[in-house]
Image (cartoon, rainbow, N blue to C red):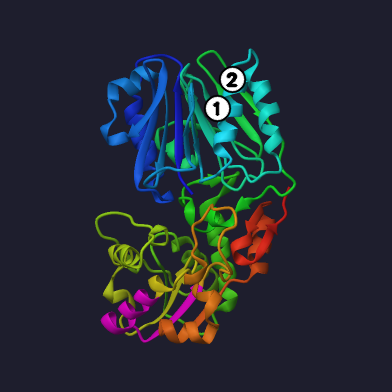
């Protein structure tokens, strides 16, 4: 699930290299190892690593698309004759969609033709995408299935900005203008900005992992505060903590709002239990076991006085392989000396991989798909273990009027708000 930001300046002179760099800094948590940027140069669109791109060339371009991508961006970046298309996830449909967008943009009413062309993908598993043309036009379109968010904003009357998250727009001191609905898109040039719609698919819904894990706490997704959604799930966890505890803490950083909610529901004090080192690492995004363990240790140095001799409730956002929580349990029990450890997971058990490729999950490594609760409890070496149930997420999602995809948790639809 990559992060993208696209910027179109209506007047020359803006340092777009800086805007793209800061925007990607705000999206680095979404995964990806390379900062790719595309810009206009010599009558065509070129792409390269942001670190090596000519900052003056980007400024002269007047429009850029930047994204976090992994290695070879196969299936996520397509270079056409007069444009470049960048998708939010790998898709075999991207080359075909990019050609249809190019043809629509060659007409005298591009926004209307875009609506017609992209509507043919209404029932397909198409990705959301951003297109930059050699004429300096931008097209952003949220797929009709709507699995990932897309938001548009503006820097006064000087720039149009689109991003995967509101936090990237706000960090640039710009204003969020619209959360695109499934099937909505924006066509922008120096002369006009036009909204178009291809209509939402019948099965349109937002990926649950976006709210559980991927988005930043300070972002708003489809009008819903990510922090408030996570805190509410944490409150629901209170019904599964059967033992009294002295302290509640969360695994940094995603699980902290869940732990706040659990603390509020149970009355047990919330404490900041861990301090990260050097840089923020998203351990679930790492592909290898060694890389995941290094990422875990970088973010999990415990504050001893918080845990010594205490009964501790530890909250995490999800459990994939169990390696993070295993490391936490060993640190707290054997290095720090916690008296009891009670683990609560603020999501249902993962049942399989993502059928849409939004989140990379190896079905062979999903601990909850291969071991029962008692075995996992013994593996983690904890005193108790509990997950949220699907009906808990269903209730919270409905309260926020959200339709969520929970396919990797064994439920195709959660919530059901309009």
Instruction: Pick whichever, 125 or 161, lies toward us.
Output: 125
The part of the image, by quadrant, that contains residue 95 is top right
Question: At 49% from the left edge and 86% from the top edge, which residue is drawn?
Answer: 375
The part of the image, by quadrant, that contains residue 9 is top left
Is residue 382 visible in the rendered image? The answer is: no
Dot 2: element: helix
User: Could you classify mark 1 by the number of other residues whose Cα lies within 10 Å: few (under 14), some (14-19), or many (20 or more)?
Assistant: many
Span colored in magenta? 326-344
Is residue 237 visible in the rendered image? The answer is: yes
Identify the residue position indicated by label 2 in the image.
Answer: 105
Image mark count: 2
Residue 98, relative to residue 267: is it above or below?
above
Question: At 36% from the left edge and 15% from the top edge, which residue is drawn?
Answer: 42
What x and y, as percent, mark residue 111? 64, 22
Identify the residue position indicated by label 1 in the image.
Answer: 139
Query: Magenta segment: does it hold 337?
Result: yes
Q: Are marks 1 and 2 in contact (CB under 8 Å)?
A: yes
Residue 375, relative to residue 78: is it above or below?
below
Furthest residue toward left: 278
User: Could you classify mark 2 by the number of other residues whose Cα lies within 10 Å: few (under 14), some (14-19), or many (20 or more)?
Assistant: many
Query: Magenta segment: does it hold 238?
Result: no
Dot 1: element: strand
Q: Residue 362's mark?
A: none
As measured in the structure, the alpha-carbon distance from the residue carrying label 1 to the one carrying label 2 is 9 Å
What x and y, as percent, mark residue 250? 42, 67
Residue 279, relative to residue 16: is it above or below?
below
What x and y, as percent, mark residue 97? 59, 33
Badge 1 or badge 2: first in the primary sequence: 2
């Amino acid at each position: 699930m990559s992060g993208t930001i696209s910027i179109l300046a209506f007047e020359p002179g803006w340092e777009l290299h800086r805007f793209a760099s800061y925007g990607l800094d705000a999206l680095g948590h979404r995964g990806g190892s390379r900062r790719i940027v595309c810009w206009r140069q010599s009558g065509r669109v070129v792409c390269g690593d942001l670190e090596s791109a000519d900052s003056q060339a980007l400024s002269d371009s007047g429009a850029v698309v930047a994204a976090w991508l992994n290695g070879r961006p196969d299936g996520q970046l397509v270079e056409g004759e007069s444009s470049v298309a960048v998708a939010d996830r790998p898709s075999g449909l991207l080359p075909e969609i990019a050609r249809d967008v190019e043809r629509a943009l060659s007409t005298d009413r591009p926004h209307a033709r875009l609506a017609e062309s992209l509507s043919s993908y209404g029932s397909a598993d198409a990705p959301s995408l951003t297109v930059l043309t050699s004429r300096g036009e931008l097209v952003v379109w949220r797929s009709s299935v709507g699995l990932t968010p897309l938001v548009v904003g503006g820097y006064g009357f000087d720039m149009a900005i689109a991003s995967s998250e509101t936090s990237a727009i706000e960090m640039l001191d710009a204003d969020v203008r619209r959360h695109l609905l499934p099937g909505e898109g924006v066509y922008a040039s120096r002369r006009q900005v036009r909204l178009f719609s291809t209509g939402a698919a019948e099965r349109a819904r937002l990926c649950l992992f976006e709210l559980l894990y991927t988005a930043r706490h300070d972002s708003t997704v489809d009008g819903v505060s990510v922090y408030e959604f996570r805190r509410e799930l944490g409150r629901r966890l209170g019904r599964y903590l059967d033992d009294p505890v002295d302290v509640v803490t969360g695994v940094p950083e995603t699980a902290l709002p869940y732990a706040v909610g659990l603390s509020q529901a149970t009355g047990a004090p919330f404490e900041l239990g861990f301090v990260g080192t050097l840089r923020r690492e998203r351990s679930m995004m790492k592909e290898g076991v060694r890389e995941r363990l290094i990422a875990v240790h970088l973010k999990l140095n415990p504050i001893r006085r918080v845990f010594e001799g205490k009964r501790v409730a530890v909250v995490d956002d999800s459990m994939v392989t169990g390696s993070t929580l295993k490391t936490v349990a060993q640190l707290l029990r054997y290095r720090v000396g916690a008296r009891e450890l009670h683990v609560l997971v603020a999501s249902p058990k993962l049942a399989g991989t993502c059928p849409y490729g939004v989140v990379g999950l190896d079905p062979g490594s999903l601990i909850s798909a291969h071991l029962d609760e008692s075995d996992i409890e013994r593996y983690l070496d904890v005193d108790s273990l509990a997950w949220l149930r699907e009906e808990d997420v269903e209730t919270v999602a409905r309260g926020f009027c959200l339709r969520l995809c929970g396919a990797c948790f064994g439920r195709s639809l959660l919530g059901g708000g309009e």
